[in-house]
């Protein structure tokens, strides 16, 4: 079996008396695409914030390739290999498309301050090298001809794709996608699906995906975790989840009244 | 593997160098022919100081997007450090004499001033940059004033000592070592370094943090580090500007470095365009020279100055140039290519 990329053990966080996420367990292996679903307010994004160091877990721990990640700051977690996209798109709006990607490549570049100020050989080589890499990345998403556009001027669907491209440029092992298909029309969703498949093939990374579009989730996820009120209520294959009574109850509510009637 | 500078960039660098040399030549001709009165060269000196102040402040205010009002505190640190160092060197007869150019002392003092200002930039930046927006503006204003008041009371800087509790005299007897040619090159080098800084991965990181600091963190950037870095770079060059100021005026009074003066430089940044170095240079020249040009209408000159500001804010709220950068290469390229295209059409 493939190497375990992410492992979370009894991960939890409480804000005051409220347990936003409780006893969250997950194991994602290399190349795997895991879905994370649940009704609104179930704590899905909170899980993402825990896994990226935005919040520090009050209980439990999580490991990336065996390395403990608790208490690390966001940028340290990202440098270790967990990258994410956001539910509400967060791009560097005033920068061009290619610069957005280049920002994320910044941590791979080796030239230091003197090299930057006096434009050393390393500066020119790395700037050219990473610009080319960024261009290749944009090609996957069909954004290569938009490279010099200001990011804010891109249509919505392409902004989503650019955010994924930027996350990929961090050179991560695990990619967290927070509702990548939100607000997209069916054509854009289909295109996004193609992109996700391409990056899985090319980069061989593990992906954890939050999504409300159930047809998308059922189509591409290999395993699914369902949470409700911060508690994991089911884990398993898509077919198992689709027929799981607790999941149906969580989404549609219990039909006590009908039973009583 | 040999790395070549991209052809276009190489051409642009050479063009800029030629442009700067031409400017320098004009300065030399004017100065040597005596066309440059001491008044005009004084105005040029003030312009030079303002250019360094405004363009370095643009790193924090424009590119990082954080209003910092303490710029003159760092300028004061640079000015006093530089002045005290050159005075000490002269008193101790170090690097003084026939064989040694005066400029050397001036440069050593000024660079030391810049470095000390940068160190204070780090010290102030670490706590201050936890805040943002209005709060940061207020705290930097406070730090600027603290620095000024402390300097005012330092005995070796012309003050009476802290026990006296009152402002001291000015620090006098600084040799006026600031030579206009040397200052010209300091300005050119400062602006060039600021430009290469902002066009590197460091600059990109700083702009990214302005646009969205959460996304910047999620792209692997240590946002605190880059914020403090931007602040420190601004402080360093403010220190350099202070060093020039000290050796141009010849005496220092801490009261000069108050928050009003800091605000003036922030105005230059906003006026020229937050995020445009050429804008800062333009605004620094215009806003330093404008009060001088308007001297004949002495009563109305502050009025005219304010009207100019109000008009810019109404018609161009992003500042004169916005985020546009002037490029000699691009301009010449356009003129040249248009001519070429024109000729081709004629042939047809």
Image: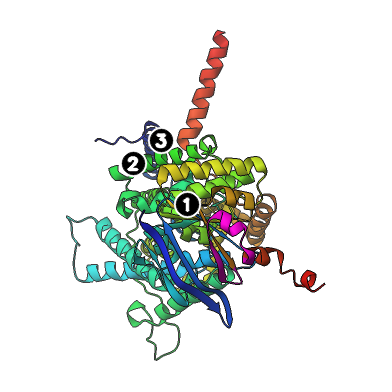
* Residue at the farthest right position: A261
Of A164 and A252, nearer the camera is A252
Chain bearing tag 3 is B
How crowded pointer 2 is (Cα within 10 Å; few <14, some 14-19, many 20+) is rated as: some
Q: Residue B287 lies in what quarter of the image?
A: bottom right
Q: Depth-wise, is mark 2 or mark 3 nearer the camera?
A: 2
- Quarter in which the N terminus of chain A is drawn: bottom left
Q: Are marks 1 and 3 on the same chain?
A: no
Look at the numbered discs 1 and 2 and tell me whether their residues touch, using CB distance below 8 Å.
Answer: no
Residue designated by label 3: B12
* Element type where label 2 sits in the image: helix
Span shown in magenta: A228-246
Mark 2 highlights which residue?
A: A124
Most foreground residue, A185 or B73: A185
Q: CA–CA distance between discs 1 and 3?
A: 33 Å
Instruction: Tell whether B87 sits left or right of B218.
Output: left
Q: Residue B168, percent across and down?
A: 42, 82
Q: Which residue is mark 1?
A: A167
């Amino acid at each position: 079996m493939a190497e375990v990329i992410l492992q979370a053990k009894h991960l939890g966080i409480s804000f005051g008396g409220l347990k936003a996420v409780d006893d969250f367990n997950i194991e994602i292996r290399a190349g795997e695409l895991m879905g994370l679903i649940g009704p609104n307010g179930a704590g899905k994004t909170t899980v993402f914030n825990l896994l990226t160091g935005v919040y520090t877990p009050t209980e439990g721990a999580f490991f990336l390739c065996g390395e403990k990640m608790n208490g690390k700051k966001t940028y340290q977690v990202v440098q270790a290999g967990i990258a994410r996209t956001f539910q509400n798109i967060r791009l560097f709006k005033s920068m061009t498309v290619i610069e957005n990607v280049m920002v994320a490549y910044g941590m791979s570049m080796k030239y230091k301050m003197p090299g930057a100020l006096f434009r050393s050989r390393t500066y020119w080589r790395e700037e050219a090298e990473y610009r080319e890499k960024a261009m290749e990345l944009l090609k996957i998403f069909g954004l290569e001809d938009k490279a010099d556009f200001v990011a804010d001027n891109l249509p919505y669907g392409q902004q989503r794709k650019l955010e994924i491209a930027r996350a990929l440029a961090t050179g991560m092992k695990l990619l967290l996608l927070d509702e990548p298909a939100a607000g997209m029309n069916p054509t854009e969703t289909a295109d996004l699906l193609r992109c996700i498949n391409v990056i899985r093939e090319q980069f061989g990374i593990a992906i954890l995906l939050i999504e409300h579009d159930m047809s998308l989730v059922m189509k591409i996820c290999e395993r699914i975790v369902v949470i409700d009120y911060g508690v994991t209520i089911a884990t398993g294959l898509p077919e198992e989840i689709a027929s799981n009574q607790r999941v149906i109850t969580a989404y549609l509510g219990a039909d006590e009244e009908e039973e009583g009637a | 593997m040999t790395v070549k500078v991209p052809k276009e960039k190489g051409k642009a660098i050479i063009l800029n160098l030629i442009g700067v040399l031409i400017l320098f030549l004009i300065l030399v001709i004017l100065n040597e022919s005596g066309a440059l009165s001491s008044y005009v060269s004084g105005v040029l000196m003030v312009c030079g100081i303002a250019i360094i102040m405004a363009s370095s402040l643009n790193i924090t205010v424009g590119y990082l997007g954080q209003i910092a009002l303490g710029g003159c505190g760092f300028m004061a640190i640079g000015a006093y450090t530089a002045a005290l160092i050159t005075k000490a060197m002269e008193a101790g007869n170090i690097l003084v004499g026939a064989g040694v150019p005066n400029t050397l002392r001036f440069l050593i003092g000024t660079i030391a001033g810049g470095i000390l200002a940068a160190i204070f930039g780090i010290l102030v930046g670490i706590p201050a940059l936890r805040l943002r927006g209005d709060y940061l503006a207020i705290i930097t204003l406070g730090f600027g004033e603290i620095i000024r008041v402390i300097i005012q009371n330092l005995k070796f800087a012309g003050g009476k000592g802290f026990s006296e509790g009152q402002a001291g005299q000015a620090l006098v007897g600084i040799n006026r070592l600031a030579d206009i040619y040397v200052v010209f090159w300091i300005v050119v080098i400062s602006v060039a370094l600021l430009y290469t800084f902002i066009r590197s991965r460091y600059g990109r990181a700083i702009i990214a943090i302005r646009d969205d600091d959460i996304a910047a963190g999620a792209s692997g950037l240590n946002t605190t580090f880059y914020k403090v870095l931007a602040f420190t770079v601004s402080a360093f060059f403010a220190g350099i500007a202070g060093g020039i100021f000290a050796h141009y005026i010849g005496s220092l009074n801490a009261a000069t470095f108050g928050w009003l003066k800091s605000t003036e430089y922030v105005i230059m940044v906003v006026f020229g365009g937050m995020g445009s170095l050429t804008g800062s240079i333009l605004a620094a020249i215009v806003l330093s020279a404008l009060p001088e040009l308007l001297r004949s209408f002495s009563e109305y000159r502050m009025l005219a100055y304010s009207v100019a500001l109000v008009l810019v804010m109404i018609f161009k709220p992003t500042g004169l140039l916005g985020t546009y950068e002037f490029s000699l290469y691009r301009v010449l390229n356009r003129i040249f290519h248009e001519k070429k295209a024109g000729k081709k059409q004629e042939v047809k």
